[in-house]
Image: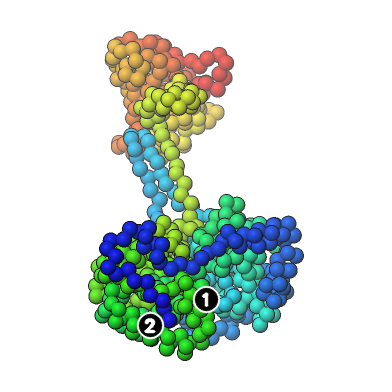
Amino acid sequence: MLRTIDLRGRGHLAAEAIEALLPRAELGVDAAMVQVRPLLDDIAKRGAAAIEELSARYDGIAPPSLRVPEDELRRALAGLDPEVRQAMEVSIDRVRRVHAAEVPPDSRVEVAPGASISQRWIPVRRVGLYAPGGLAVYPSSVIMNVVPAQEAGVRELTVSSPPQPAFGGWPHPAILAACQLLGVSEVYAAGGVSAIGLFAFGVPGIARKVDVITGPGNIYVATAKRLVMGGVGIDAEAGPTEIAIVADGGANAEFVAADLVSQAEHDPLAGAILITDSPDLARQVDAAVRRRSAQTKHAQRVDLALRGAQSATVLVDSVDEALRVANVYAAEHLELQVADPAAAAEKIHSAGAIFVGPYSPVPLGDYMAGSNHVLPTGGTARFASGLSVMAFLKSVQQVEYTASALRDVASLIEAFALAEDLPAHGEAIRERSRGRAVRGPLPEDLAEVTAPDLVGSLPPAVDDAAATVWEVVSNAVVGKTNPAESASAGDGRFEPPWAGPASRPALEISGSGLEDGLRVDQVASHGADQAVEQGDCDDWLGPLPPLEPGQAARTEVGGGTTTSGRTKPVIEGPPDDPDRP
């Protein structure tokens, strides 16, 4: 039944040569576009009316309404066979535990003092999940799509599945029951291209467009997803399902044959490949496949799939060569039924999912393993992954630099900008090196003040009755002319009039007086007898007059008066800046 491709005795074939010899179902998306594009255009233009017409034409019935009433969901779950319900509940639990572990943690990297990059993972807000209902009905696909979206934190989940004539135009009850078990109440009766169009464009008054579409389907679903990609995100263009089994002479021929037949019953275009170094096993498997395919319920479908150009037995010289062929094929499902399957799995780098050993068959992954059964097909496992929480998450980087951290790389940024002939980029950096006053409300409880709070946030007055005074005393001046290098060591104390030694804490500032500005290096908030917070608070606080050794500078903020009796230069803002303290 399975045709034979004999690669024995050919030496070390290049990957390209192997790929050219291996069977593969044709996806045919390009040809299907001619049919699919006008259907999507019609859905975008006419909405519900177009979908209803397509349902009547392709599904044999138009649904009573596009949105499935919640009563139908509850009725479907109530009528579900108890054993099937238990199977769904166990599947949901296992899939949920696996996908909960996939959620990546946020991260923060400090690339330099005061310079950090954070990465946040943010879920998309709304997704459309397609559950096929043509040759077979897949409540398992509802679970495999909904659970990772829920674990990713998606707020709005919608499901669509074809209307069924046998159920009054509603989707199959098993689909509706799975939605009810999962808590998904927004369900639509639309299949194929209609479902993809509903998700991608929305239907006025009925359904809003989504951010991401996921779920398997036939060639027309894959084509529709390609055409709407860009307006919305998609998981993948799923083609016909496929299985590859690497087996040695010690494998159980009945196990191998049963697994090939099980995958072939999905679709006449399903691919089933045995890769083995044992001609005896190949003969045993072929005999078992003939017997089993004749006895199975969907015998005609299985026969077409196993005799098709996409299925074969591939003979090789060794198990290592079989694994190499498997990597070139990059199967959606790869079973390893060899003497040491765990060691063999370590050598696989291209597969949608790897099923290790004789007791980890593909049907286990379809329903109950906990893994996801929405997997890359058609060789795309070379670069693509199965459905996971990552399909529903966006990575957003958050950049946070202090003034001093920016100053440290300012000249390098300007050099880069000039090299790319983008001088305004450099000017945007240079603008931030010019002095400015720090101003803003001071928190009532100084014990809660941290250094970042102070950048851009020092006083004016706390209230109408209390003025605040800020003093910085210079103790020594370093005689250099470069403002980034010339500094005078200094310290000072910021004490609101209402702050007493035994009541509210005072704020201590130590910093550097530069020729054209004041640089604050450390800030500490002190309680009655101990420091509470300390941190880097570098910033330019505005121009200062030149400082001589022993001189000091002060500023009066909020219109109050200082109690200091010493004579010091006063920091004043330019006349055209009324907000400058």
Q: Which residue is mark 2?
A: 286
Tell me the residue that label 1 is attached to: 268
Q: Which mark is residue 435?
A: none
Q: Quadrant of residue 256?
A: bottom left
Q: As rendered, which of 408 and 307 lies closer to the eye?
A: 307
From the viewer's side, name the closer residue of 96 and 162. Answer: 162
> Where residue 140 appears, x then y in whole percent?
50, 74
Q: Is residue 540 left or right of residue 12?
A: right
The residue positioned 45% from the left and 52% from the top of the image is 121
The residue at the point 65 percent across, 71 percent down is 189
* N-terminal label among 2 and 1: 1
Task: For the N terminus, give its image quadrant.
Answer: bottom left
The image shows residue 403 at horizontal and vertical percentages of: 41, 29
> Amino acid under label 2?
Asp
Residue 30 drawn above or below residue 430: below
From this viewpoint, is residue 566 visible?
no
